[in-house]
Amino acid sequence: MRIIVCEDYEAVSKKAAQMILSQITLKPNSILGLATGSTPVGMYKNLIQMNKEKVIDFSEVKTFNLDEYYNLPRTNNQSYYYFMHENLFNYININPANIDIPNGMTENIEAECDRYDATIKEAGGIDIQVLGIGNNAHIGFNEPTVNFEKGTHLVQLDESTIEANARFFNNKDEVPKNALTMGVGSIFKSKKIMLIACGEAKAEAIYNTVYGKVVPEVPASILQFHNDIVLILDKEAAKLLNKEDYKTA
Ligand code: GLP
């Protein structure tokens, strides 16, 4: 695991955007795995700016998102479909046909999960997967559980995740109880992984991800086994890590 610790959220966002820029510069038709949550918003802002300045070109890029709430219409401003358009897609030169997000309104969950996994495979697999991390070390919506789930599947959200995400809704009861998410197996297949995390609330999850036992109760711990992963953290998220284990930027 490579770990880079930046001064603050702004620096993390810039660094993460630069990594995406490098990826697309090397391979203009890159397949990106994208994430939602508040953490990547700053990175997306940087990418929008780079696209405006014609430093980065998304015309050949394909994207797959990690997850989507189940049974929340795409028009709902808390759906991840809406989030991605509002925070990135509407402002860059990506071809809408090259965007894929699990369809949380599907009437056939199994068929939709199979379609999603098959489409990623047909595209050639994800070149770089962006990840945030939940306070409970979930990645995508892979909650702490007793098994690592491989492919895209339906999950029941943890009470702590519902509470954490309630800030985006009018109240806790409005937060969907289920979601479709890529499994840890799908995430693990990405050629590169970039996990970004900021703030003290993530410090314990990051500590367990880096030093803990690889167990499904700490979903992000599986990342210890990936051979091309970088963690980009701010000082607070990194505060429990040993200084010799990271580089500062
Ligand atoms: C949600 C998403 C995750 C994300 C997490 C952290 O639960 N499904 O992919 O990593 O939120 O969100 P934040 O970045 O707002 O802390």
Image: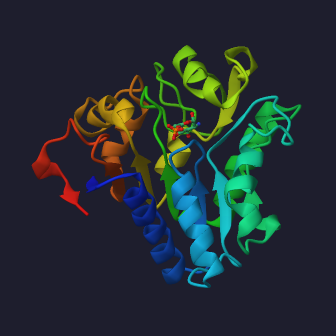
Residue at 58% in and 62% down: 45
Q: Quadrant of ligand 1?
A: top right
Residue 167, x across and y down, in percent: 62, 27
x%, y% of residue 232? 35, 54
Q: Residue at x 81, y 65 (%)?
A: 96
Q: Quadrant of residue 156?
A: top right
Does the rendering let one see residue 127? Answer: yes
Q: Residue furthest bottom?
A: 54
Relative placement, left or right, of 48 versus 3 is right
Q: Nearer the viewer, residue 247 or 213?
A: 247
Is residue 125 visible to us here?
A: no
Residue 235: % across, % down: 27, 46
**Figure coloring:** rainbow
Number of callouts in the render?
0
Left or right of residue 238, residue 30 in this image: right
Q: Nearer the viewer, residue 58 or 186?
A: 58
Left or right, 204 with reference to 179: left
